[in-house]
Amino acid sequence: MTQAISDSVSYLDEPKGIKSWLFTLDHKRIGILYMWSIMVFFFIGGMMALIVRTELLAPEQILVSADAYNQLFTLHGAIMIFLFIIPGIPAILGNYVLPLMIGAKDVAFPRLNLASWYVYIIGSLFAIYSLFSGAVDTGWTFYTPYSTQTSTSVTAMTLGAFILGFSSIFTGINFIVTIHKLRAPGMTWFKMPLFVWASYATAVIQVLATPVLGITLLLLIFERVFGIGIFDPALGGDPVLYQHFFWFYSHPAVYIMILPGMGIISEVITVFSRKKIFGYTAIAYSSLGIALVSFLVWGHHMFTSGQSELAAMIFSFLTFLVGIPSGIKMFNWVATMYKGSISFESPMLYTLSFLFLFAIGGFTGIMLGALSLDVHLHDTYFVVAHFHYVMMGGTVMAFLAGVHYWWPKIWGRMYNEKLARISAALLFIGFNMTFFTQFILGTKGMPRRYYSYLDQYQPLHAFSSYGSFIIGIAFFIMGYYLIHAIFKGQRVGKNPWGALTLEWTTTSPPPPHNFEQTPVVTDGPYDYDRIMIVGDERVYKDGPEEGKEIAKEVDSESKK
């Protein structure tokens, strides 16, 4: 750990100018580097989605050919999964706020942290290269045997995803060691914020599951380049084996995407309810429970692939089982809000959107875990809708809640709250127009990934596309007011939300070392039953008489 500690203070000697960013060891700057990099790919993936939905306004060609359509939905999926959702919350918000939340000066291995960003950039360059060298058209899962036979740029894209996996592993290792070794004095495991618990569980999955994807993609590359026959039946291979390998990683990867988002929801919901989190221990352990069970359910993606009836029954049962820890979190969040002094600032609006949309995503996931239903709904738009309710309705909504919650801390300035509420409302409306409609399309038998379709599906497809345009408008509004806030937003103090976790005890934005002096933790992160923030100071409700009177007065005003 001596090397880690010396690394964490060495950024004081960094050069100025552009080099101070390209060679920075400050976790906060690395988080910002990730932010701009990942947002570029989010924009590209989002524009591809809008082109796909525009093409689906009618059964006949509108914008692009059938081949281009296959490439667009493949690239949309691959970019959103590998370049945005998987790295998004850990690399941006985790990098920036996790050390602050545990009272650390930096992550345990700052140089490894910077290396993870460079690895991300290298992997993304391979993905960009694939766009111009015969864009891949296999779907984002790269299923064999088609992925071993197509002339499109599968090798470049999968090599990019392989490299990106190392960035994920580096970040996971860094977070695990940081949480174990660099917590502030007095911060026991059960005084850690729940975002830190969620990040810890995510890091465990990143370190254990990502190598499986790396090996799988490497085998696919060897198959294409050298024809070794692992997935080729003519050479003694099995194309379904690829699915087993791929989903053994990719279902835990779903929780790499959603677990950090759940951690954000735990933070936001207690701050804007002004109430102690209900069932802290249950939420913390449920994060670890999700991480464990997530490794056991990959076969529910393969109910129609010919696996044995016994295996299908076991995977179906385990799919129902993995819903339990998620259900624990949902009930605890709702119980936290019960009789709380709820305020509806934009972070809370995105949190409420998450609760509604993720509940639908989780419920429809249980439906798809039922064998009899899955046989009929497999590879229909019902699956597309379910996936987006979990990934966008869950992960992205939680990410946006976190961005709006910590934006004043990152930049020291507040965004336009009125525009933020309008954007949240438009996003919620547009999302449900787009994807709830696709549940109906799926139950009516509309297959996913089809370029053309029967006329009877046209009204529903058009309605779904109109919803996607509203989503696009919401994101453009959001981009405007967030970027405007960086330069011209109203300046804020240490703690504009009145939160109790450690990141709100330092300046906005924080200094290079995060804290003027190492904080000593004496209170829990959610003790709103006995502490409130007045200005930037803590007032204890059970403290001196003067403090009690101030607390009573502020509490009365907040209830009004």
Image (cartoon, grey):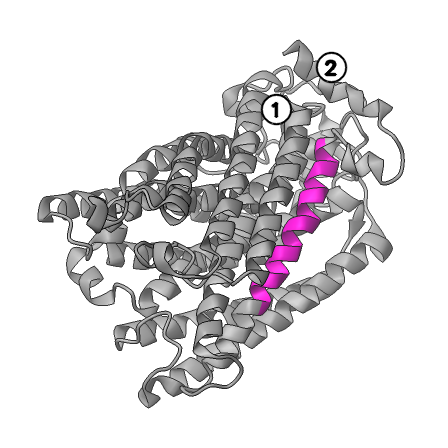
Determine whether, in the image, residue 376 is placed left or right of residue 433.
left
Residue 297 image offset from top left, x and y in percent: 27, 43
Instruction: Please state the extent of the stretch shown in magenta in the rendering.
Output: 27-47
Q: Single out the mark in the foreground, 2 or 1.
A: 2
Which residue is denoted by mark 1 in the rendering? 523
Indicate the amino acid at tag 2.
Ser
Say which of 146 and 93 sits in front: 146
Say which of 325 and 240 sits in front: 240
Which residue is denoted by mark 2 in the rendering? 6
Q: CA distance from mark 2 to mark 1?
A: 29 Å
In terms of secondary structure, where does tag 2 sit? helix
Determine whether, in the image, residue 481 is placed left or right of residue 276.
right
Residue 336 image offset from top left, x and y in percent: 48, 44
Residue at horizontal 27 percent and vertical 52 percent from the top: 301
Say which of 327 and 72 sits in front: 72
Determine whether, in the image, residue 159 is placed left or right of residue 39.
left
70 relative to 317, above or below: below
Residue at horizontal 62 percent and vertical 43 percent from the top: 122
Q: Say if the magenta span includes residue 34.
A: yes
Q: Say if the magenta span includes residue 298.
A: no
Give the prevailing secondary structure in the magenta stretch. helix
Q: Earlier in the sequence, mark 2 or mark 1?
A: 2
User: Residue 296's quadrant in the figure?
Assistant: top left
Whether residue 345 is visible to the viewer of this picture, yes or no, is: no
> Dots 2 and 1: beta carbons under 8 Å?
no
**Which of the image's four quarters has the N terminus?**
top right
378 relative to 461, above or below: above
Residue at horizontal 42 percent and vertical 43 percent from the top: 253
**Which of the image's four quarters has the C terminus?**
bottom right
